[in-house]
Image (spheres, rainbow, N blue to C red):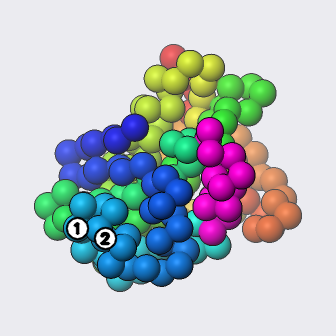
Amino acid sequence: MLLQTERLILFPAGLPILDAMVRKEWPQLSSLLGGVDLADGWTHFPEALAWMRDHLKENPEETGMWSYCVIHRNDVRLIGTCGYKGFPDPDGFLEIGYEIAVAYQNRGLATEAALALTGHALSMNGVSGVMAHTLAEENASTAVLRKLGFQFVEEIVDIEDGLIWRWIKKGT
């Protein structure tokens, strides 16, 4: 499902798009996204894109639950990615993640993307809240989550990332 905000289009990244991203086929990626430009550094986590592509190859029914391309409307440019990390957990919480190219940071665009994801998630059947994880330090992501009404709930150890903070926002 395409999500739109005042300044952004969140374009669902299905298998062809993820495959072009992983293979670094930039002209094909641009074409699949309607001819957009690509901002420098639009992804900080290429390994996550490869994981998502491989996961969707094995689980095509999950297309749409994973990744979106963040396209800046006025610049007609891919500036990041965002999405959900699978289906809701047993408590009904759906995890979000987001990244924005450095040149587009500090403009409220990560907040706008995360707000769109959160609102969409809370409208889904079976979702009682939204969860996010950040590094265990004050940073831009913690500021985004606070702006959106997320609450810090705990510090945990992640096998891959080490110490991280868990944030939640309950649905109404």
Callout 1: SS: loop
Q: Is residue 125 magenta?
A: no
Q: Name the residue beneath numbered marker 2.
A: 30
Quarter of the image where one finds residue 53: bottom right
- At 55% from the left and 44% from the top, the residue drawn is 63
For residue 104, the mark is none
Q: Are marks 2 and 1 in contact (CB under 8 Å)?
A: yes
Could you tell me residue 6's position as x and y percent?
20, 45
> Would you say residue 104 is visible in this rendering?
no
The front one of 137 and 2 is 2
Could you tell me residue 86's position as x and y percent?
65, 43
Callout 2: SS: helix
Q: Is residue 9 above or below residue 153?
A: below
> What is the magenta range?
50-62
Could you tell me residue 12's position as x and y percent?
42, 49
Q: Name the residue beneath numbered marker 1.
A: 35
Is disc 1 surrounded by few (<14), some (14 to 19) or many (20+) residues within 10 Å? some
